[in-house]
Image (cartoon, helix red, strand yellow):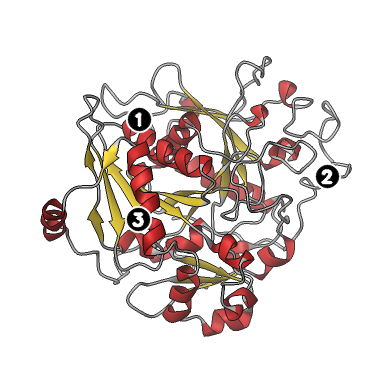
Amino acid sequence: MLTVKKVPTVVSNYQDDGSKSISDQSVLGCGRNCLGKCCFPVSKLSLYSFKKKEEGGDNVGVMNNSEDSNMSLQNLLFGQWEDRMMRGLFCYDVTACETKIIPGDFGFIAQLNEGRHLKKRPTEFPAHFVLQPFDDSKFNFTKVCQEEVLFRFEPSSDNRSHFSPTAPAVADMGSNSTNVVAINVSPIEYGHVLLIPRVFDCLPQRIDHESFLLALHMAKEVKDPFFRLGYNSLGAFATINHLHFQAYYLAVPFPVEKALTHRVSIEMGNPDNKGVIVSQLKNYPVQGLVFEAGNSMQDLSDVVASSCIHLQENNIPFNVLISDCGKRIFLFPQSFAERQALREVSQDILDTQVNPAVWEISGHVVLKRKKDFDDASEAYAWRLLAEVSLSEVRFAEVKACVLEAAGLQEPDVEETKKEEALHFEPPSQNLLHLSQGCLLLL
């Protein structure tokens, strides 16, 4: 059973752009012990090596290090995250935030998080372009302190999982840029971390095939359906233009995970049949697509990444939720920022100052004012998310283009009806089967 420790609310000094003294640390590189090329070559960050290949049986999580034979990725991540919390590296104590399930049919989750509103880093770029070049003058993850990094996350050479508490850094970062997992200093939930692919390549916030597959590997390696990964594009409330995925643990099903779907894709006769099934959400406030199955993780990743690449190249903001240990992926094209610029969003929704990114769209609504939290209702959550969604006509156009980009097409009406008849009902709202010790309801 995980024990959540309480710590005083403090502001991390290590993501400030200005120079600050750092006690009890050796002076390395620039003197700030940062994650930049100046300091990283002489660092000894922990290394988690994951199984990359899928053939030959599933040995994910089997460790070869004798001192860490019981060290699963989940235990490592949560243990390191709590260690950083005890060191006072977070902007506020997220474990003190109130959380509740909103009464109703969907089970939307509301959290009161006033600290995130007051101390979160502001966005430093315009929101009307999904693709923007990386700007080293703006905040990026090479400027964080190495103390905020939990471990490196790399594929293993022997197709088994390993953990090395101290592993020398790669000297030639130009040809072998490393992936890192770091804390989100403005967390939403327990274990909130950032997966930063190829951090020294300084990639802008845009999906590519290699990085998306890396995120699926992390979801699979953790092996817990209550640990999800999310992605926000620029224009869909990503606040840092440096490629990253977010992830955290919450021991309740998200409303979107329980939503009904109907199948909207079939293969286009491609000899390289990937076996990926694409469905559309039904009776949910945000129009979205659900990708699942596939002959392999690689195939599922390729289809979703191709869909995301199409959206970003056509300047369509979107959010992605990686669910069920990487087996189900939700894709939400959205238009909130555009509607806001056109003054089409209701003023009472704007007054809440809620930015509907991937977690809100999935049904975990982070509220910034006590009054909004106390008054939160299913009707409010539905109205908020409905402001995010594309219209039915626009979504149909985007869906057709996404399916084409993924090498798929929509089935005819008879096949759709047959698929819907076979679809099962969502699980009940009863949460008694969950481990209440892991549910952070305060």
Q: Name the residue under label 2.
A: 17
The image shows residue 307 at horizontal and vertical percentages of 41, 41
In the rendered structure, the answer to whether residue 74 lies left or right of residue 424 reads right
Q: Which residue is drawn at 87% across and 45% down?
A: 18
Which image quadrant for residue 300?
Answer: top left
Q: Residue at x 23, y 28 (%)?
A: 270
Q: Name the residue under label 3.
A: 396
Q: Is mark 1 on a helix, strand or loop?
A: helix
Q: Residue at x 81, y 47 (%)?
A: 16
The image shows residue 374 at horizontal and vertical percentages of 55, 83
> Which mark is in front, 2 or 3?
3
Q: Mark 1 points at which residue?
A: 298
Residue sitting nearer the eye, 165 or 93: 93
Q: Characterize the local packing of mark 3: few (<14), some (14-19) or many (20 or more) Cα atoms within 10 angstroms.
A: few
Say whether disc 2 or disc 3 marks the residue closer to the N-terminus.
Answer: 2
Q: What element carries label 3?
A: helix
* Quadrant where the N terminus is found in the figure: bottom left
| Amino acid type, label 1 | Gln
Say whether disc 1 or disc 3 marks the residue closer to the N-terminus.
Answer: 1
428 in relation to 317, above or below: below
| Amino acid type, label 2 | Asp
